[in-house]
Amino acid sequence: MKTPLILSTVAATAGVFYFAVQSAPTAQDPSIAENAAQELAALQTQFDTERATLTEQTAALNAQIAEIEGAGQGQQDALDDAIAQRDQLTADL
């Protein structure tokens, strides 16, 4: 009694999978492959453009950081000189 039910379920499942496989688009369809290749090329171009932009922005930010660090070092040197002069004046007193 259970065997026909099991066999009919297996047959129905196999039929569903066969239909799904037959109706699915394949890579052999040239229009799908061409569309995928064009989309991939467009994404690659977009990636390259964004990467170049980010590289330029990174270089500009690194230059700004170096400039700020240089200015900060100059201020630190001036502060150290002022402290040394104060210490010298305090010692002279």
Image (cartoon, helix red, strand yellow):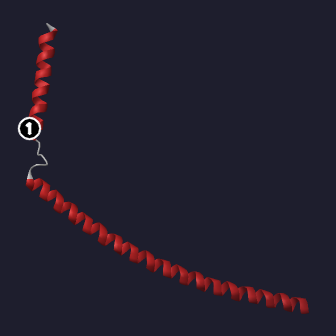
Residue at 35% across / 74% down in the picture?
52
Q: Quadrant of the C terminus?
A: bottom right
Residue 81 visible, this angle: yes
The image quarter containing residue 43 is bottom left
Q: Is residue 89 left or right of residue 33?
A: right
- Against 74, is 42 above or below? above
Residue 93 visible, this angle: no
Residue matched to label 1: 22
Instruction: Give the residue type at disc 1.
Output: Gln
Residue at 44% across / 75% down in the picture?
58
Q: Quadrant of the N terminus?
A: top left
Q: Is residue 48 left or right of residue 36?
A: right
Q: Nearer the viewer, residue 30 or 62?
A: 30
- Against 13, is 5 above or below? above
The x and y percentages for residue 18 are 10, 32
Mark 1 falls on what kind of element?
Answer: helix
